[in-house]
Amino acid sequence: MTSSGISSAAVATFTARERQRFVAQNPKSAALAERARHSLFGGVPMHWMADWSTPSPLFVERAKGARFYDVDGHEYIDFCLGDTGSMFGHSPDPIAKAIAEQGNNGLTTMLPGEDAVVAGELLAARFGLPYWQVTATATDSNRYVLRWARGITERKVLLVFDGCYHGTVDDVMVRCHAGATQPRSGLIGQAYDLAQHSRSIPFNDVAALEAALAQGDVAALLCEPAMTNIGMVMPEPGFMQKCRELTKQYGSLLIIDETHTISTGMGGCTQLWNLEPDFFVVGKPIAGGVSCGIFGCSAAMAEAMQAARHRASAGNHGHGHSGMGTTLSANALAMHCMRANLEQVMTQAAYDHMLPLAKRLADGFRSLITKYDLQWSVTELGARSEFQFCPQPPKTGAQAEAAFHDELQMALHLYLINRGILITPFHNMTLCCPSTTAADVDQLIATLNQALEELLAIPGARQ
């Protein structure tokens, strides 16, 4: 019995038909995939780009707003939006203009400009933290904040939630199994025991949280305010407030990573729920799709950072290497685009458009679940929503993972792709942007309805 209630045999029959359809519809993508095999490892510029549901990679020609177009001339409604990198649509006009403006004025100099000052002021006003740093990605931001946290507290252990996602920081690549912290499966080239300085506990488990912090060795709790990568998992009422209360009580810092949860509104969950973190991280969408990450800190942390920097450089005449920063961090192009994004794209008007559409989409998912009497559920977070193969929304990462039916998920995704709709791979998450329309939402629901009708008509589909 699969968690979804739909037989794997029926899914296999359904998938085989859809794979044939994809191959027939996409000869140019197939030809590029074959050509790419000879120069790109796995036939793609980053290996996970081959992990979609399609028989071979789908090659994109261009993207704008809530649409992209493949090399075979097909148009797609995009509810993935670069897995949040294009949360406000592909190439918003102010970002396209900012790229053109900066393109002839220098891309990187290792020196700041006025854009950096304005962006810092805008970030402080929006997120409620006074001091900011700019990186190349959210992964970098998390990595650097972790260094600061360990330097400030002079503790080594990082606490994370089971099933968390914070980019590719080594320290977060752990899971919780039977109460013990273990490395995530599939890690390549891991040279040391991650459990030595990382601790993983279940989300929404206050007792486990306090037990982990009470050991007195935790530098920081790094968390999303709602989990978004193992399948969406919302915090129980008061849980995030407990995270703040208990980290303070046991001398640990609280780092809130809102790279995905910024979908909730202008100030993210941090402002919406008054989370008061010591450090705050955002990446992918902050510069309108141009690679950029940021982290902010409280005034108390800024003072503690200065002290930690002094301690680290003691005996070196005030010099030393912090282990933070890359040459392209805070480059001129990223700063100009981030300023434009904060001023003109990532606006209240944008959220006012996105949020009701996401609610319409979530309600549509629920209507299909009821129509077909499926034991599935829907989770919402701002402009983001997801249907999951479990009767009630999961409360932990382990529960969300237990609801996976990978073959069914990929079959439904492929069906949608074959009919011009893209949702986030690896789970069933969707995102609405300022260019998304009610008609786009209705088309996704209608197409998913058609998919379920055809799938459930296969003999033996229901278990």
Image (tube, grey):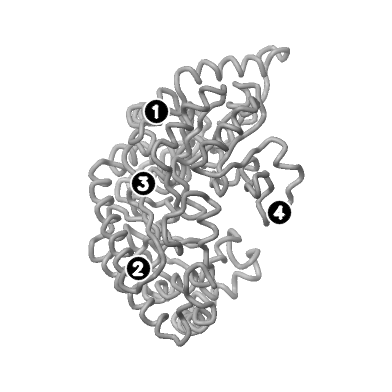
What amino acid is labelled 3 in the image? Answer: Ser
Which residue is labeled 3 in the image? Answer: 263
**Front in this rendered view, residue 198 or 104:** 198
Say above or below: 156 vs 102. Answer: above
Disc 1: CA contacts within 10 A as few (<14), some (14-19) or many (>=20): many
Q: Give the quadrant of residue 146.
A: top right
Which residue in the protein does label 2 denote? 369
Looking at the image, residue 270 lies above or below residue 86: above
Q: Quadrant of the N terminus?
A: bottom right
Q: Residue at x 26, y 67 (%)?
A: 442
- First reached walking from the N terminus: tag 4 or tag 2: 4
Q: Residues within 10 Å of mark 4 (few under 14, many from 20)?
A: few
In the rendered image, residue 422, in percent from the top left (x then y), is placed at 40, 66
Q: Amino acid at mark 4?
A: Ile
Is residue 313 shown left or right of residue 125? Answer: right
What residue lies at 52% left-to-right and 27% top-to-bottom?
A: 247
Mark 4–mark 1 distance (CA, rounded to whole Å)? 37 Å
Which mark identifies residue 389? none
Regarding mark 2 in the picture, which secondary structure is present there? helix
Task: Identify which amino acid the numbered label 2 is placed on.
Answer: Ile
